[in-house]
Structures are given as structure tokens and as C-alpha cells.
Image (cartoon, rainbow, N blue to C red):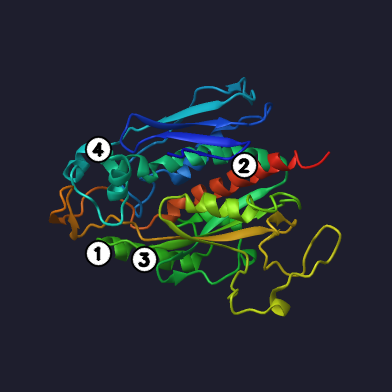
Amino acid sequence: MANSIGKIFKLTTFGESHGVAIGGVIDGCPAGLEFDQESIQNQLDRRRPGQSNITTSRDELDKLQILSGVFEGKTTGTPIGFIIKNKDAKSQDYSHLKDTFRPSHADFTYQAKYGIRDYRGGGRSSARETACRVVAGSVAQQILNRLGVKVFAYVSRIGSVNLDKSYSELDLTIVDNNIVRCPDDVCSKKMINELKKVKQEGDTVGGEIVAVAQGVPAGWGEPVFNKLHADIGKAMLSINAVHAFKYGFEGIDVVNSRGSQVNDLIMNSKGTTKTNYSGGIQGGISNGNDIYCQVSFKPVATLMQDQETIDIEGAKINLAGKGRHDACVVPRAVPIVESMLSLTLIDHYLISLTNKI
């Protein structure tokens, strides 16, 4: 099982949804970084369950405990080990799933692959694991901040409610002003109403998040197999419930466009372009303009409705909806998306230091 991401700045995670704890090891973090644990906790608080009336009612505080790699407030260059204890696990809520496969979950596929599975909240396949990504991504963001790189993300769509504005028209500093993390007052209210309606029906809905990185210099990324956009895409698609990834071409039908319409004309020696349809990446390498992408999430697979499925013997059964779940994951996924972008960028920054003398 692949439990790690990154080549130089590397994160390995462990733990299950209803185990004692989840945690991880960050390897490759440079020594001497002023370690801001409060900012990491702030990011965890943005992701944690039970934060509003539109999220799951599971009430985890997600308090971070650093085990190694930090001394007297600074990173030492050695592996940073950490854990987050599970405090509000209710394994009994999942006892009815011991021999049952939930539709569109990883239950059947884990059983097929390993011959055994932790059925409590999905075990290792649960999005609970993403808290570990937020820890590592927050450390990465601290290094990026020193380099003048800023990473933002926001909810641009929930179900049929779409924020039809470019990120450049928005104030990305007000993303957390509402519970859906949409930086538009009118659209956020519509999204909240949509979520409340879906939740009341015992159903779920998908959504989209836009992520932006500003200040990335030209030269990060690799020209062939480890292209910057390919690694960003892999990072995003590794997030639970993500089903599509697109970078660049904001508001443009890329297939139905012509080169004369979408070529980004270079304006100066810094690589600044007249337009930015390329999304800040050309030939797999950053070109110095804003990097932006769109991440699409499918509806949560657990419904508070009856569904047909099978048990471990293949017999057809009726599965009743039960447990604590989000009606839509995107409001809590914003810091996860920011973290995966940050992890990819910091890794490519460190790789870029080996490219030339």
C-alpha cells in the first residue's frame, strides 16, 4: 500500500478512522524553520468535523501532538513525527457493516485487495486520514511563505449553485467568513440553503474547489514524467471523493478553442504573460504566473436513505442509512486542497535546487 507522497519533502501517514490515533512522519523538512504549531492547529480546525451545522456531527478536536523533529521551536532537519488522537470514535455505529458492502465506498475493493478490512468508518479509506495531510501541508506553507509564495483555495460550486467569477475578481482573504468557504456573500447563502435542503432529504451533493498559488517563480517542475501539473493532479486526485482535476483555461472550453485565441503572449523577461490560460505552467514547468486549478468532488457515498447492496456472501440486502457524515465535503476540503498544492510545490522547490549550479 502506498502511504507516502513526495520525493524530497516526503509525507508518510498512518492510522484509521476509528483507531487510537492517526499520524504521520514528515521527512526532508529543512532544519532551522521557525515551527509555528499554532498556524498548523488553525488549519486543522478548518478541516475538523463538527465545526458547523452543515458538516458531520462527529466532534473531534484534532489536537496536534509533535513527537520529534522540532527542538526549541525550530525544525532540526530530522523526521517530524506527529499524532492526532481519535476522541469521538463510535465504532458501534458501524457494526452493521461488518459483512456488508456500502455502495460507491471502498468496502468491496479493500476486501477484494486485502481479504480483510476495517469496517469502522471505512478504516484506512476514510477521509479522516486527510488531517495528516493538513499537518504536513501547513509545514510546507510555512516554508513557502518565506519564499513569497501564497496558497489559497475556496469553494466555487456546490451542486447547482456555481460562483461564476474568476479568482482574480475575488478577495481570497475572506474565504473563512462563512461556513461554506465561498468568498462571495450572495453565492455562499445560496450554497448554504442548497446544503440544508440536501441534508434534510437525507441525500448528498458534490462540489468544486478552486486553488491558487501566487508568487511561484519560473523553473519549478520537471519536463517529462514529473511535470508540475501532473504531480499537482496526482496529489489532488488522491484526496477522498475527488473525481476530476483541471488546471488553467479558466472559463474556457479548451477543446473547442483555437491556438490564436488561447496562446499566452510573453510580455517581459520575467515570463509575465498577457493572459494566463496555461495556468502558470508550460512544458510541465512553472512560468512565473499564478498557478490555478479546479478540483471536483463527487457526492458523499453515504446517504441517510435505504440502498440496495450485497453482503460478503453475495446475497442482496437492503442497507439503511446510518452514522455521522457530511452532506457535501467541499467546505471542509478547502484546507486539504491547499495542503496538497503546498506539498507538491515545496517538493518541486527543493528538487529545483538540484537542477543547476
What residue is disc 3 on?
193
At horizontal 19% and vertical 57% (from top left) the residue drawn is 309
**Circles 3 and 4: CB distance less than 8 Å?**
no
Q: Identify the mark nearer the N-term, 3 or 1.
A: 3
> How far is mark 2 from mark 1, CA to CA?
39 Å
Q: Quadrant of residue 316?
A: bottom left
> How far is mark 3 from mark 1, CA to CA?
13 Å
Q: Secondary structure at mark 1?
A: loop
Q: Is 305 displayed left or right of 244 in the figure?
A: left
The extreme top residue here reads 72
Q: Toward the viewer: 204 or 49?
A: 204
Q: Is residue 332 visible?
A: yes
Q: Identify the mark nearer the N-term, 4 or 2.
A: 4
Disc 2 packing (10 Å; few <14; some 14–19; many ≥20):
many
Q: In the rendering, at what x and y percent does residue 80 appear?
A: 55, 27
Name the disc covering residue 141, or none.
Answer: 2
> How far is mark 3 from mark 4, CA to CA?
29 Å
Q: Secondary structure at mark 4?
A: loop
What residue is disc 4 on?
90
Closer to viewer: mark 2 or mark 1: 2
At horizontal 18% and vertical 47% (from top left) the residue drawn is 312
The quadrant in which the C terminus is found is top right
Q: Is residue 58 visible?
A: no
- The amino acid beneath tag 2 is Gln
The quadrant in which the N terminus is found is top left
Q: Is 305 displayed left or right of 28 in the figure?
A: left
Q: In the rendering, at what x and y percent does residue 35 appear?
A: 61, 30
Q: Identify the mark nearer the N-term, 3 or 2.
A: 2
- The amino acid beneath tag 4 is Lys
Q: In the rendering, at what x and y percent does residue 264 appear?
A: 74, 69
What residue is disc 1 on?
201
- The amino acid beneath tag 3 is Asn
